[in-house]
Image (spheres, coloured by chain):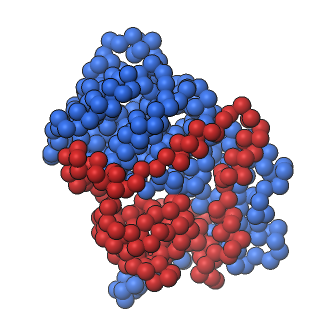
Chain colours: A red, B blue
Amino acid sequence: MPRLRGPALAAAALAVVLWLAAADTLVVKVQTTPLRQAPQFFSPTVATLKVGDKLELLTAQGAWRQVKTAAGLSGWVHGSAAEVPKFTLVAMSGGTKTQATAQEAALAGKGFNKEIEQGYRAKHGEVSFVWVEKMLATTVPPALVEEFIKKGKLGEGRTRP
Amino acid sequence: MSSRRLFGLLALGAVLWAAAAPAAAQIRLPGKIGDAAQKAKDAAKILKFVRSSFGDITEEEEYYIGRSVAALILSRYPVLDRPAFTSYLNTLGNAVALSSDRPEIFAGWHFLALDTDEVNALAAPGGMVFVTKGLVLRCPDEDTLAMILAHEIGHVTAKHGLQSIKKSRLTEAFTTLGLQAAESFGPAELAQVTSIFEGVLSDIVEKLVVNGYDRKYEHEADALAVALGSARGYDPNGLLRFLQTMVGDATVVSGKGWFKTHPTPQDRLGKSKSEIGKLKVTPALEEVRTQRFKQILAALR
């Protein structure tokens, strides 16, 4: 068996431990997502969660996660909308604290963002975002999708695990 | 956390900690950091550790990359500005995306038709999907168009666009982004990161629009289309019907549009048939769907 040496391997080992330790916490990773009464797409919405909201994981059922919000509301979110916060886990690996600092969180969130897009747009005035904004503004109410599915005899559909 | 799980965790942690302690000391985590400069340097090391591959690109970053990729696609093609068709396309696309691995994506799934006779479909990272009028008019039924959208959704869920970013560029991006300690970029940093961002867009657009994806990605997207299209309730043979129309087509011969990539329609037909053969249940074509599709198409012609 190879010796457990080297920063990468050791840090990965720590990450596994810390992932297990913090697996009861999820963070919303999409702009908004509904907190639903039941683990189904067209189930009534209890509340709307926003990116960065922290959730307590209660249980899992297929691709769905039953969670509790900081405000004490319980409901279901789809697994694709929330994740175990990676950066917080690694920040914990110092062994001296349980949360990333605000600065670390800002650093973790910093990347290709609105500021970078604005820098790109300032440099490339010939690239128009008008239709991109129109495209993103086009939304379909869930009730319409549900009706479309029913009228098209598409059944309940099966969510891939 | 249950006591059994806690005990197991502590035992595992004790073993791994012994092996990991030297590395933890090398990384010098924030709890042991003194001055601000050292703090930023160490934070950068942590970020470098956390972010090393395309899979570490956050949902928000994927969205911002996708927005600009979409803008570049739209700088090459005119938009088919038909609100009724756009509404139908978005309803259909969202119905299919619900069965994917990523029904919830950063800013939701969005679909738009391009006003060109070219037979093509493209997907920008972050869930912005485009189909050309030429492709839509080739579809005999809704199930066929649904399978094309499922193929493009597959490219997004498997992050094929993000995988087109050169590894060296990604390493440069993560290193540069990690080294910035301030909450917003200074002018020099902004210029540097914008330059890397331009490179990222160039890598993706080159694959999407100029060269096309590699063979393995096209086959993977076909397999995903069969899985998620049929999971939604669409007849997966719609993909075969479309591919069949492209056999021997001049568009394929000239290497343009949806078939600029290596796998030929015949090659994709064979592999897709095999994927359909693996399904336990194969949904059938429904006349009600074909009728509503024909009504929508009549208004489009």
Residue at position x 45%, y 40% from top? B111
* Relative to B259, B56 lies left or right: right
Residue at position x 78%, y 49% from top? B190
Residue B66 x, y percent position in the rendering: 56, 43
Residue B281 x, y percent position in the rendering: 15, 45
Nearest the camera: A90 or B69?
B69
Q: Quadrant of the N terminus of chain B?
A: bottom left
Numbered label tally? 0
Residue at position x 34%, y 56% from top? A143
* Relative to B131, B270 lies left or right: left
In the image, is residue A29 above or below residue B97?
below
Residue B186 x, y percent position in the rendering: 83, 55
Work out whether residue B153 can be spotted.
no
* Relative to B206, B29 lies left or right: right
In the image, is residue A85 above or below residue B242?
below
In the image, is residue A58 above or below residue B211?
below
Work out whether residue A112 can be spotted.
yes
Residue furthest to the bottom in view is B3
Residue A98 x, y percent position in the rendering: 59, 81
Nearest the camera: B90 or B16?
B90
Locate residue B76: give its quadrant. Answer: top right
Locate residue A81: give its quadrant. Answer: bottom left
Nearest the camera: B30 or B211?
B211
Residue at position x 80%, y 69% from top? B38
* Relative to B95, A72 lies left or right: right
Q: Quadrant of the C terminus of chain B?
A: top left
